[in-house]
Amino acid sequence: MNNKENNRTPLLRKASKTFLITSIIIMILSGAALYIYTKWLLQNEIEEELYSEKNRVEHLLEQNPELVGIPPIITAEKTEIAQPNILVDTLIYDPLQDEIELFRQLSGTKNINGQNYMITVRAMTIESENILFAILFTFLVVILLAFIFLFYLNKSRNEKLWKPFFVNLDRLKSFSLRSNQPLSLEDSEILEFHELNREMEDLTAKIQIDYRNLKQFTEDISHEMQTPLAIMQAKIETIINDIDINEAQFNEFSSLQTDIGRLKKLNKKLILLAKIENNQFTGTETTSINTTFKETIQNIQELAAINIKLKEENTIEVPMDGSLARVLCNNLVSNAVKHNSNNQPVLVVIKDGSVLVINSGTEVLERPDQVFERFYKESKKRDSTGLGLSIVKKICDYYGFTPSYRFENNKHIFQVHFVV
C-alpha cells in the first residue's frame, strides 16, 4: 500500500469528522451570539430600570424636596449646575457585602420647583452577569448533549445505510475473473446503490465472458501454432539436407529456421503464461530454491562463456510447483547472462529470504518501472522475446513473491523476495 492510500480516510470516519467539526463550529458561534445578545438584553433591562427608578425619585422629590435617597443605591443632592443624563459603570463599596462591587450608574439633574437636583441611581451588575453565565452554561450543556446524541445517531444511521456498500466492496475485492461464479452483490433499499449493484453485476458478467473467450482463443491459437511451426522447421531441414543449394540459399533457409525457432520459443512462453493465469499449476510441494538455482546455473554454465557464481548465506524452501520454480530461476539467470557486459561474472546471492541476480551493465534502463511488463525490451538482440521477466513477475504474483529491479554501481540487480 503506497503513501497516498495510507493517507486516505474511510467514508464513515470522514463523514463523522465533518459532522463533528461542523457541530463544534456551530456550537461556538451560537454560544458567542447568545452571549452577546443576552448581555445586550440584560444591559438594556438594567438601563430601563435605572431610568424608571430615576423618574420615581423625581416624583418623590416633588412631594418631599428634602429627600436624600438611599445611599449608595439612590442619592439626590441640590446643585447649581445642570447636567444631562449620563450612564457609566462604577465601582462602589457596599457596606452590606463589605466589598467593592460593580454598579451601573445613571446620573443627571432635574429642576424641581425651581431647584436643580443631581439624582443618581445605581444597579448592581453582578446579578445580571450571573444570570448571563447561567443562561450561557445551560445553553452550551443542552446543545452539547444534543450534538453528542445526534453524532452517535448519525453514525449508527450511516453505518446501517452504508452497510450493503461495504459488504459489496469486500465481495468486489475477492471477485476473480478466473472464477466461473458470477458476482453476487447484496441488494439495498437505496436506489443509487441498487442501480450501482445492477450495473456492476452486468459489467462483471460481460468481462467474465470476454475473459473466457480470450483465454480460450489464446490457448487454441498457441496450441494450433505448434504443429505448423514444427512442420515448417522439418521441411526446411529436409531442404537443407537433401537438396543441393548454394550458399545464399543456405543462409536464407538458416535465417528462416532461426525465426521459426524464435516463434516456437515465443509460443511456448505464451502458453506458459496462459497456464499460469488459468491456475493450471496446482502442485505445492516444498521446493528448495537453493537446489533449483544450483541446477539452473550448472545447466546454463555449460552453454555460456560467462562465469556464474553462487553465494549462499541461508536456505530458502517454499511451497510451489517445481516446474515453475525452474522456470523462475532459469529466466532470471538467463536474462543476467544475456544482458551482461564486459564478460564480467554473474553473481547469484541467496540471503535473508531473497535471491539477488546481479550482472554488470554500462547504464541504467530507460524505463526500469516497465522491466517486468510483457514484450518490454531495450536489448537489440533478435533472440530476445521480451517475455522472460514478465513470466518471472507472473510466477511471483501467483505465489505472492515480490520481484524488484535496481541499478547500483554499474550493476543490474534483480531481486525476488520469497514469502517463507
Image (cartoon, rainbow, N blue to C red):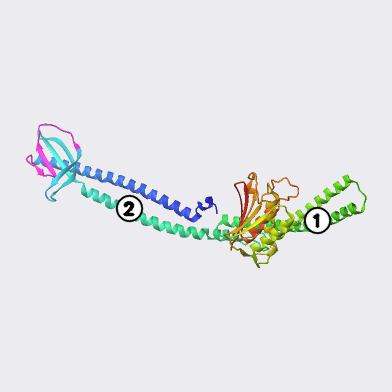
Q: Position of 149 compared to 197: left or right?
A: left
Q: Label 2 sits on what residue type? A: Phe
Main secondary-structure element of the magenta-colored stretch: loop
Q: Quadrant of residue 186?
A: bottom right
Query: Outermost residue, top direction?
Result: 81
Work out whether residue 108 or residue 228 is closer to the camera in this orientation and state it: 228
Residue 288: percent from the left, percent from the top? 64, 65
Q: Quadrant of the N terminus?
A: bottom right
Residue 257: percent from the left, percent from the top? 83, 51
How many marks the image carries: the answer is: 2
Q: Label 1 sits on what residue type? A: Met
Question: Quick one: SS at disc 1?
Answer: helix
Q: Would you name the residue on which mark 2 appears?
A: 139
Assess whether mark 2 and mark 1 are in contact (beta carbons under 8 angstroms): no
Q: Would you name the residue on which mark 1 appears?
A: 225
Identify the magenta region: 64-86
Mark 1, Cα crowd under 10 Å, few <14 / some 14-19 / many 20+, is some
